[in-house]
Amino acid sequence: MSGKVERVFVDFNDTVRRGDLLAELNTDILRLRREQQHAAVLRAGANYRLQLISYNNQLALAERNLISDFELLTSQTNLENLEADLAVAEANLRSIDTEINQFAFITSPIDGVVLDRRINEGDTVSDSSATGTTGIFTIAENVTEMRIEANIGELDVASIYRGQAVRFTLESMPGRRFNGVVENIRMVPVMINNIVNYTVIIRVDNPDGSLYPGMTCAVEFIVARSENTLVIPNAALRFQPSSLSREEIEEKVFFADLELMDYEQRERALAEREQEQANGSTRTNGNQRTGIIALLTGGTRNVRAVAVQAQARAIGSQEGIRYLWYFNDSGSLEVMQVRIGIITASATEIITSADLEGRQFISRERL
């Protein structure tokens, strides 16, 4: 309904229950209309009762054949018309009563918290059928359970699935990390700066109410996790000593590979090497591969990956094989073969049977 706001009973952040009174519209005009409509009901009722008496008289005369059938039918029609007018007047009166008793009193449809109030006392509101109307209250049903709408590029959305663990941070709360779970992936594409994105809905618990609606955050989707694992800085895996020639590096790498082979593999590798040397060929190193960069949680040994692709250099030709350089007891450079797992932005998981913990590896050199 339309009308002037008489009183407002709630403000921002107020907790309300279903049925609580939020605001009241002025009903002075409505009450005047009710009086007018009540008078219209009385007038329609009086006309109906008068016509009912006339019809009964006409009916008695018709039974004694003192009037024609046309006169009786005319009287009956007038009675039915006045009965309909009375019904319309009563319905209009009930409509005004409904506006006064219900529409003029705006109540909360749910239990929740008032996030926004767009009216003040004295403002005029329009009914919902008018063009350009907006809501006068915004109520959140449960601010302890919120959601994030994250825009994910088409290259990364394939790594996201329902139930996936998520963590996020806010610039307004430095040092705090929050967790969530992927609830849904909307299939409707959204163009942002000519890049196709998809909206991912993330469910978040907010028991202490520290998260407010409309906040922005940086989201990380955990696509892989390894706990209680050994990690090493990425620089150590990329290092190659400048003091050794290419042939010397290849020689040391070859014998590092031999240490992890069984007898038959070792004999076969030695025979192939002798054949290559006889043919004047050299062993090819330095292949490129695409890895998955992850983020390393500080203070723990938990490695969690995010879907970001990057180029990771490797010396070995086998997938997941890298080499670490170190000084042996006599001070000479040596190399060790290791198998890697999750690669992070700064560190890499080491999966190997050798005991590496506590050993010092070279990550850079002073030139």
Image: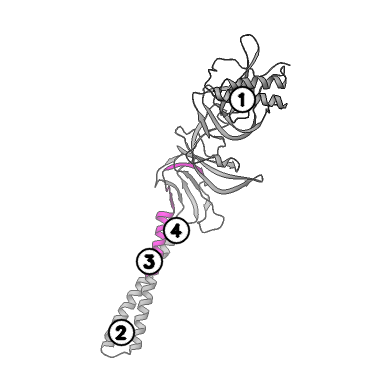
Q: Secondary structure at mark 4?
A: helix
Q: Secondary structure at mark 2?
A: helix
Q: Secondary structure at mark 3?
A: helix
Q: Which callout, 2 or 1, points at the residue further toward the start of the chain?
A: 2
Give the mark toward the camera: 2 or 1. Answer: 1
Distance between mark 4 and mark 1 Cα atoms: 99 Å
Q: Check if residue 108 falls in the magenta segment.
A: yes
Residue 30 against residue 204 in the figure, above or below? below
Callout 3–callout 1 Cβ contact below 8 Å = no
- Residue receiving disc 3: 90
- Residue receiving disc 1: 269
Residue 253 against residue 161 in the figure, above or below? above
In percent of width and height, residue 280 lies at 73, 26
Distance between mark 2 and mark 3 Cα atoms: 27 Å
> Callout 1: 10 Å neighbours few (<14), some, many (20+)?
some
In percent of width and height, residue 323 lies at 62, 23
Q: Check if residue 43 falls in the magenta segment.
A: no
Q: Which callout, 4 or 2, points at the residue further toward the start of the chain?
A: 4
Task: Give the label on residue 30, or none.
Answer: 4
> Callout 4: 10 Å neighbours few (<14), some, many (20+)?
some
Regarding residue 265, the answer to whether it shows in the image is yes
> Callout 2: 10 Å neighbours few (<14), some, many (20+)?
many
> Label 2 sits on what residue type?
Gln
